[in-house]
């Protein structure tokens, strides 16, 4: 369902610029209407209801706002500092993407929780390893990039205790901890908040690192399920980069995933831990049919008990982004 948004400002040129940009770049998220005169506004409001309205001061003070769920004041930078605002404020003349992000984030807080356990649209691929340092994140992003090259909308969700995101992406957005707070309160629309604060780089949509690693550690299974469903509803493919733990949260992700990639590499420790998981853990039998072993850095896995294997070469580069983009050219 698209957000119904009204832009009401006497600055007709800016209103047209804003609405045209939204229609071109955010049509899947927002249905926009425009009024640049009070006559137009007074004629429109009795006929339609809006989730959000961006209104300049003249419009917001004169209009009957009963058909608007959340009026927001579209204002200059100087108006942003006024004490005790009656309405949420959105600053004019900033990047349109920043305006949309602010609108979605603010509206997500007052929206009713729309979570549905069956609301996900994406195929879900879980990327895991029983050993650390095997290139799990690199593989996850290589796979994500390969799906982008096939013109899929891809969401990368990092659930590691200590996030690897800063090594691969610019962290210019807001922390995933904001989503955790909403999930914990069970209020608001997590999917809309994710739309508002997510970043995008090289065609991959992602959320920035938690404010504190404890934020991931205390995430409940129910909250994890809601987080995954909310992200899956925004993409064709959801790639989940998991922690190396094999706990109840990991088991939940395995259960929800359509595909599981288990990553290993040539070190003795990685081989020992992989063999222990395969031979000693009943969980492996439950996911075996949907599991692919990712043999990273040219490791020989001919003796493994996993039929589906993808072998990746060893890419020598100190630049993490270069490595995953190079590996994305392999056939997954």
Image (cartoon, rainbow, N blue to C red):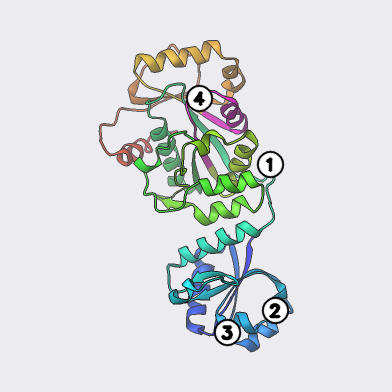
Looking at marks 4 and 1 on the same chain, the residue that comes earlier in the sequence is marked by 1
Rendering quarter of residue 286: top right
Q: Nearer the viewer, residue 49 or 148?
A: 49
Which residue in the protein does label 4 denote? 245
Of helix, strand and loop, which one carries label 2?
A: loop
Q: Residue furthest left?
A: 317
Q: CA distance from mark 3 to mark 4?
A: 56 Å
Q: Which residue is depicted at the point 53% across and 42% down? A: 237
Q: Nearer the viewer, mark 3 or mark 4?
A: 3
Q: Badge 4, how many Cα within 10 Å: few under 14, some, many 20+?
A: some
Q: Which residue is label 1 attached to?
A: 117
Report helix, strand or loop for mark 1. Answer: loop
Q: Which residue is mark 3?
A: 58
Report the span colored magenta. 238-260
The circle on residue 280 is none
- Residue 32, quarter of the rendered image: bottom right
Element on which disc 4 rests: loop
Can residue 316 be seen? yes
Find the distance from the CA under tag 4 to the CA under tag 2.
54 Å
Mark 3: few/some/many CA within 10 Å (<14, 14-19, 20+): some
The answer for how far apart the CA atoms under marks 3 and 2 are is 15 Å
Dot 2 crowding, Cα within 10 Å, few <14, some 14–19, many 20+: some
- Mark closer to the observer (4, 2): 4
Instruction: Determine whether label 4 and label 2 are within 8 Å by CB.
Output: no
Give the structural element (helix, strand or loop) at label 3.
helix
* Residue beneath disc 2: 45
């Amino acid at each position: 369902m698209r957000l119904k948004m009204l832009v009401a400002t006497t600055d007709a040129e800016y209103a047209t610029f804003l609405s045209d940009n939204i229609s071109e770049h955010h049509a899947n998220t927002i249905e926009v209407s425009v009024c640049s005169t009070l006559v137009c506004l007074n004629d429109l409001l009795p006929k339609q209801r809006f989730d959000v309205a961006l209104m300049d001061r003249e419009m917001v003070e004169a209009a009957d706002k009963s058909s608007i769920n959340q009026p927001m004041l579209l204002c200059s930078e100087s108006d942003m500092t006024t004490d005790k605002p009656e309405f949420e404020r959105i600053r004019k003349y900033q990047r349109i993407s920043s305006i949309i992000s602010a609108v979605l984030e603010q509206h997500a807080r007052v929206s009713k929780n729309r979570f549905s356990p069956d609301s996900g649209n994406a195929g879900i691929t879980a990327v895991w390893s029983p050993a650390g340092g095997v290139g799990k994140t690199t593989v996850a992003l290589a796979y994500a990039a390969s799906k982008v090259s096939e013109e899929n909308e891809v969401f990368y969700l990092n659930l590691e205790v200590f996030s690897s995101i800063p090594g691969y992406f610019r962290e210019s957005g807001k922390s995933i901890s904001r989503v955790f707070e909403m999930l914990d309160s069970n209020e608001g629309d997590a999917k809309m908040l994710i739309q508002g604060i997510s970043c995008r780089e090289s065609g991959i949509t992602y959320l920035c690192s938690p404010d504190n690693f404890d934020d991931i550690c205390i995430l409940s299974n129910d909250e994890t399920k809601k987080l995954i469903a909310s992200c899956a509803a925004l993409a064709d493919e959801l790639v989940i980069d998991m922690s190396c733990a094999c706990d109840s949260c990991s088991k939940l992700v395995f259960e929800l995933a359509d595909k599981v990639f288990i990553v290993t590499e040539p070190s003795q420790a990685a081989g020992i831990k992989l063999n222990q998981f395969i031979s000693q853990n009943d969980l492996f039998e439950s996911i075996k049919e949907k599991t692919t072993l990712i043999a990273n850095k040219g490791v020989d896995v001919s003796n493994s008990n996993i039929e589906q294997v993808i072998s990746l070469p060893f890419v020598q580069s100190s630049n993490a982004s270069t490595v995953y983009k190079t590996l994305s050219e392999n056939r997954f």
